[in-house]
Image: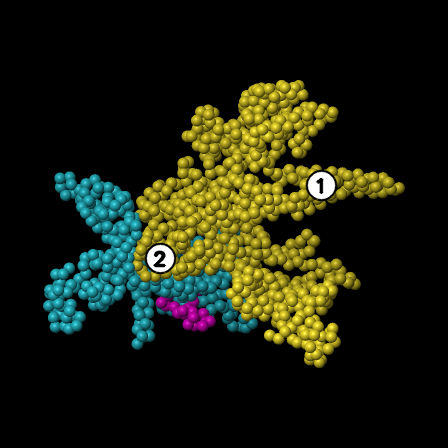
Amino acid sequence: MPEGDVSMAEESNNGSGLDYIMSLEDVPSKLPPHLELFKTRVLCNNDAPVHTETIQYSGAYATLGVDNSVRLDNFCENFKVEVKRLTDSDMEFDLIGIDPAIANAFRRILISEVPTMAIERVYIANNTSVVQDEVLSHRLGLVPIRADPRLFEYPENAGDDKNEKNTIVFKLHARCRVGQPRITVKSDKLKWLPNGSELPCEDVRSNAGSKPKTFTSFTCSQDSLPEFSGNSISVTYPDIILAKLGPGQEIELEAHAVKGIGRTHAKWSPVATAWYRMLPEVVLLEDVVDEVADELKNKCPANVFDIEDFGKGNRRATVARPRDCTLCRECIRGGKEWEDRVSLRRVKHHCIFTIESTGALPPEVLFTEAVKILEDKCERVITELS
Amino acid sequence: MDGGWKTDDGIQMVDGDNFRPKCIYVAVMMRRIMDAILNKDAMDDKDYVGNKRLELSGQLISLLFEDLFKSMTTEVKNLTDKMLDKPDKARNFDMSTNIITLGLERTLSTGNFEIKRFRMERKGMTQVLQRLSFIGAMGHMTRVSPQFEKSRKVSGPRALQPSQWGMLCPCDTPEGEACGLVKNLALMTHVTTDEEEGPLISMCYLLGVEDLELLSAEELHTPDSFLVIFNGLILGKHRKPLRFAAAIRKLRRDGKIGEFVSVYVNEKQHCVYLASDGGRVCRPLVIADKGISRIKQHHMKELVDGVRTFDDFLRDGLLEYLDVNEENNALIALYEGDATSETTHIEIEPFTILGVIAGLIPYPHHNQSPRNTYQCAMGKQAMGNIAYNQLRRMDSLLYLLVYPQRPLLTTKTIELVGYDKLGAGQNATVAVMSYSGYDIEDAIVMNKASLDRGFGRCIVMKKYSAVIQKHSNDTSDRILRPNRTADTAGRMQILDDDGIAAPGEILKPFDIYVNKQSPIDTRTPKSGSAANLPDSAYRSNAQSFKGHGGEVIDRVVLCSDKDKNMCIKFLIRHTRRPELGDKFSSRHGQKGVCGTIVQQEDFPFSEKGICPDLIMNPHGFPSRMTVGKMIELLGGKAGVSCGRFHYGSAFGERSGHADKVEAISETLVSKGFNYSGKDFIYSGITGCPLQAYIFMGPIYYQKLKHMVLDKMHARGSGPRVMLTRQPTEGRARNGGLRVGEMERDCLIAYGASMLIYERLMLSSDPFEVQVCTACGLLGYYNHKLKTGICSSCKNGDNISTMKLPYACKLMIQELQSMNIVPRLKLADA
């Protein structure tokens, strides 16, 4: 596009160096349209997607006189977040004007670095059920717990000390009496013990006078702390099956939850999953009319296309709901002529982000936590470098 | 009997002085031989399944019993004779012998059938049923082993016989030396048992068989006469063989004679064969009259409603069993629609030509045939549920999957066999792409989060036992309450107060699980009470645990063994999550080891947020041609998205027992997937989309019992063999890794002599010897004089010291003991 933006050239007239060159009238400041397309769109052809990568190098278009460097003011101006759906457990929002690499960083942090509380140690006093101890412990570990991890410390920081700052204790006692039908033990049987462990530590039973030593050393009850007074700690879902008990079988155990991150074990991951997809863009390369338009509309299982009537019984296909496109590529199946009619694209710098929370924190809080973690990381890099 | 008897070899026997039937029999045999010489086509095929008989346990045991019974009677007679020879006949006479009990027990426990009376000498006739997996047990029970030895290099008996159709599984045979010889029964095969012959023979005569006694040789072989041969003996002739056969078949369908009696007209040999003997394989078929099936819609409805069973179909003459020979007289249509007016039978379902194990493979008819065979071998090694009572059993080794699943893509066989209730695998979401380079050579990249959530987790149960031995001098081992203050207390932490490890305790290596003590003296008879031995008369014989650590005691059983000693059995359980090198396999003979385990965030994800459980390299497909696996992926993906189990029975597309790819594709499209199952995937590392659409969906994956933990082995220094002082061999003895002959050759060729020197001597069995340079014999080192001395020269003048492998020194001395004198000639290097 050789016409150049005259107004922009006038604005930065007094500059020197690159700015001066940029201000010259015959220097293009924009990319030619085909390169602009390749830079900003993924073309989802029938055989394979092309131009999937983002162009990071600042001087990638230097020969064309276009500056490709990332500018903070540019980013601030163009960046937008639109929340599309928000419930207790999941959320969908658009990140507009962001590089997919950054969106991916958030996704990665959400999956593996935002901490939660999960059951890590299980002290089994009695388990006569068919579920083996370690399998039961594994199942307990995967039960999501409604407790704000920000109020707790990592256990590594406290050494061996298990205090009210780093441990949540649950008790589970279920029994199926002889002569009764078998019962299903669900996660609502897990009862929070704000005063810490009740099981006596076996190896120190000598000092009978004082309180028997248990597996935790709480200085005060957790529910006396102001942050838990309002909302007590519990499991997120009361109906997770833990075990089934036959007549005469019993489970008695204590489970200790600690803070951790998803990279260590998936049970600490705060999200069921978090992912993004790039905004779909469906472009009709030529006018699709009449029967072909009907055919196109019927081809799409996601119902992306509509038919527009423009008088005299003439119909034309329009792209009505491109966001619904699942990229099933039905519309470009069936020969070259269809590939020439429809072009499926993805907008690279527009990510539709979805977070499915497991319930420890609401999804919007999870995202802000992820942003904070990324901030921390950046700061660490900056301090290391300086 | 009229015609005569036959021996067990099926040859006509002489009844009294009447040699006529035997003569005719021999003549007919000669006629057949001459026919075969003139015309090679008339030759019998010894690999033809109709000419084979399977031996069942009942027949073998009855043979064994007959032998033992006869032995017993002679033994009793001998005893009685001896008794009668004695003067005091009034003495208590015990004629009870336990020859039969002992004989049966011995034969069944060793598996060696040695019956001299019948010149039978066979090994491995009884086998312990494989209980490592449910499918393994099923496969073992349908196995057919050949009688002759496997070393013979003939292809005939190994080749797939067309007559195996529907009787023996074409896929399920082991690889290697027993390939094609060991077979497996197909799904609906029945093996007949002996049926009484007398009534059948008299019925034949009633149906117009002309007795052999009344015929001349000329009459016997007139062109229109057919010999009637019943279980190998000639009954006579019949002029209208087809009518005779039809009459017998009608009687059979009406249930007047046994359903497994077969009749078959051989036009070429002018014979009608009747068979009621045991060991024939046969299978059920739907009877058709002039091409119209006898089973009608209302019959099937009754079957679905549960009013009618398979036996009712048989009794009502809608189905019948045909053996391989009688199949030659039938025209069998594959489907009802294919039937013509000549058709006599219709197949029940084509997938029944496969056996139980091959029936687990979805879409086997789309796979390259050896892949199905490989899967048949591997399906038996898959971990999963083995039985409903699996947690109450005490097997010496048991592999279980923690979360077994039912395959998303099932087959009819799976439902019939019950594999959907006792599965051995999990539905893994597989992405067929290359990732990280750790997936070459069939390796699999696994998702760590999936493993965290329980994918591939398994339980290994092992049985350990301890016997409280009673010794010959009335002393006995004892179990002691652990001494909690002694220095071994740490190793005795898991013991209960009774000295036996408590269930639920977690074991560490070298933990003592039974605190047993044995008396020091077990020979000399003790005076007085054996129980009051002092503690000093016992030494510790505690059994310590040798394992990896982290195992748990699952159960402890106290019982008595066959010598009435108390026996304590421990079932020790180890829960393992998959690790690098564990073996996995799909149901299409595509095995692979876990190459690397990758964090979930590094894994690719789809537009719908789906992240695969494992990644398989696409190079596994072109050369293996397992198209069935691809269809399984498509069908599984359609199955999860529409909520219906899809089917992939063998040859099932036509009869609706397998979903067609077109239909599956339609389902996929309606659920927003691409018709080909290829998804738009984002890289988890860069965040950008991948430059290809990725074939992704669920495939049923089996975890095989070969795990790294049981196999890995390395040694720095360790135990040595006493005799040669070389390192021991094998993982169980913590042995060394041998530089073998071929490795040595490579090193020689390369010229790495110092390396050879190190591996073959320094790291193996170096030994310092004193050699006398004068006589060349080995001397010894005198520690008092601090010199080497040659014992043949009686001095130490010419001794030099050198290093030899101990094995070399040993050989020199062994040769000397045989009066061969090897002399070493030393020269300065």
Task: Please report the residue visible at 71 percent of the width from the left and 76 percent of the height from the top.
Answer: B789
Please tell me whether residue A157 belongs to the stretch shown in magenta: yes
Q: Nearer the viewer, residue A143 or A174?
A: A143
Residue at disc 2, secondary structure: loop
Closest to the camera, between mark 1 and mark 2, is 1
Residue A278 figure quarter? bottom left
Q: Is residue A154 above or below residue B102?
A: below
The chain to which mark 1 is attached is: B
Q: Colour of chain A?
A: cyan
**Amino acid type indicated by mark 2:** Pro
Q: Position of residue B457 (x, y in %)?
A: 47, 56
The residue indicated by pointer 1 is B116
Q: Is residue B396 above or below residue A374?
A: above
The residue indicated by pointer 2 is B604
The disc, 1 or 2, on the residue closer to the chain's N-terminal end is: 1
Please tell me whether residue A252 belongs to the stretch shown in magenta: no
The chain to which mark 2 is attached is: B
Q: Nearer the viewer, residue B332 or B577?
A: B332
Q: Colour of chain B?
A: yellow
Residue at disc 1, secondary structure: helix
Name the image quarter holding the C terminus of chain B.
bottom right
Residue B613 figure quarter? bottom left
Structural crowding at the residue carrying mark 2, measured as other residues with C-alpha within 10 Å and reported as few (<14), some (14–19) or many (≥20): many
Task: Please report the residue visible at 28 percent of the width from the left and 49 percent of the height from the top.
Answer: A46
Task: Please report the residue visible at 47 percent of the width from the left and 33 percent of the height from the top.
Answer: B347
Q: Position of residue B29 (x, y in %)?
A: 63, 28
Residue B822 figure quarter? bottom right
Answer with left or right where residue A199 lies relative to residue B692. Answer: right
Give the residues drawn in magenta, as a range.
Answer: A146-169
**Amino acid type indicated by mark 1:** Lys
